[in-house]
Amino acid sequence: MTDRATAKPIPLFDVELSAGEVEAVAETLRSGWLTMGPRTEGFERSFAAHLGCRHAIATSSCTAALHLAYLAAGVGPGDEVIVPAITFVASAAAVRYCGATPVFADIVGPQDLNIDPDDAAARVTPRTKAICAVHYGGYAADLGRLAELCAERDLALIEDAAHAPSATAPGSDRKLGTHGLAGCFSFFSNKVLSCGEGGLLATDDDEVAALARSRRSHAMTSGTWDRHRGHAAGYDVLGLGYNYRIDEPRAALLAARLPGLEEDIARRRRLVHRYRELLGDAAGLSVPFSDAAVDRSSCYVMPVVLDDGARREPLRSQMQQQGVQTSVLYPAVHELSAYAGGAGGPLPRSEHVARAELTLPLFPALGRTDQDRVVAALRGGLA
Ligand SMILES: Cc1ncc(COP(=O)(O)O)c(C=O)c1O
């Protein structure tokens, strides 16, 4: 039995930076050039090569990248974008930034927390402009069927790949985030590749890339770095843009961390396989996705779905008392105050998962002993 007074709390996620990664930031600070410049360009080139796509445009966040992606898809006032109900609010908020309406689709179910292509198809109207495929936890949504639907109905496919750097879909080596018109990544501090706050839009489409680059920085015809290098003396502004720029210390940190990404994901996958083994026979819960899917996933989080959602909050407080932090990914967006009351009726599978999902600690440096403590606390709480 764990001694509660002495056992160290186990956080939901943890970030460990190497000395080299810290030095990359320190060196950038010493350089005196802090806003978007050569390190950002270098990271964009490396990430595009990593994904195997033509363009990577770094942004201040994934939310900003999603806004730019929807704008590039032509989403505007009066339009609709279909978004899964189980996602972080950003996937839907960025639709609203365009003056459009997010229309929520149900997920497949407790075994697959991604958008259900049939339910998405049923929600297409003449106003629909795009479908947002969120790859929950780094597990691929059904891109084959979503791409087919988008082609049939002339819609843009936008991938919210916030959780999914380096992940792939079944039967394809192509990285998630490169299958649709644009893919959006998050480098928020708890993400698989993190720098604090940051994001990126990936695309093979030259026009989408040009729009994203321009709108990222106020639609100005030149940036501070161009003017510093003498490439431009002044600037014009060609449209309504935003300040969605990343800065050099963050870009330097991302560039320094990118080479370690595959190893971090390999560790995450080993931990998830072990969780699945340890929880395979646990009564009262199921573990979403399959063993095969784990090996294609970036394994951002470790979700379990309880049979009885009413047990979740007591279980969470019991686990917290034993020093195990848990979370919920996610409340259903259509049930949040600012999104309630939309058209479309109930979304029963999303609503069940929103009440019954529990997210367990997962990060590359999570040790086996701590993982055993998480499992014991979970099993004990459900006994
Ligand atoms: C699915 C999803 N989309 C978008 C975002 C927004 O990312 P950011 O915090 O970088 O804006 C997140 C962040 O948690 C997310 O989980």
Image (cartoon, helix red, strand yellow):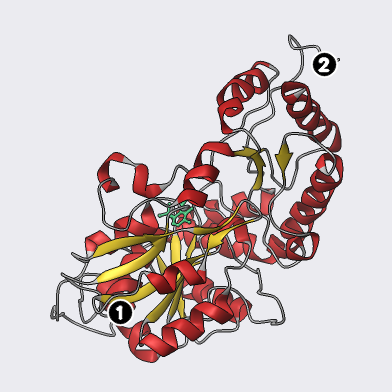
Mark 2, other Cα within 10 Å: few <14 / some 14–19 / many ≥20 = few
Q: CA distance from mark 2 to mark 1?
A: 53 Å
- Please state the horizontal and vertical placement of residue 46, each as a whole percent of the image: 58, 76
Residue 144 visible within the image = yes
Cβ at disc 1 under 8 Å from ligand 1: no
**Residue in the picture at 85% in, 40% down:** 281
**Residue nearer the viewer, 216 or 158:** 158
Cβ at disc 2 under 8 Å from ligand 1: no
**Residue nearer the viewer, 26 or 103:** 103
Q: With 264 as the anchor, is 84 left or right in this view?
A: left
Which structural element holds mark 2? loop
Q: Earlier in the sequence, mark 2 or mark 1?
A: 2
Q: Quadrant of ligand 1?
A: bottom left
**Residue in the picture at 70% in, 57% down:** 289
Residue 21 lies, with reference to residue 205, above or below; the image says: above
**Residue nearer the viewer, 368 or 226:** 368
Image quadrant in which the C terminus is located: top right
Quadrant in which residue 155 is drawn: bottom left
Q: With 315 as the anchor, is 383 left or right in this view?
A: right
Quadrant in which residue 1 is drawn: top right
Instruction: State the mark number for residue 255.
Output: none
Residue 184 visible within the image = no
The amino acid pointed to by label 1 is: Ala
- Please state the horizontal and vertical placement of residue 214, each as a whole percent of the image: 27, 78
Which structural element holds mark 1? helix
The amino acid pointed to by label 2 is: Thr
Q: With 336 as the anchor, is 172 left or right in this view?
A: right
* Circles 2, 1 touching at the beta carbon (< 8 Å): no
- The residue where tag 1 is placed is 72
**Residue in the picture at 65% in, 68% down:** 167
- The residue where tag 2 is placed is 2
**Residue nearer the viewer, 173 or 254:** 173
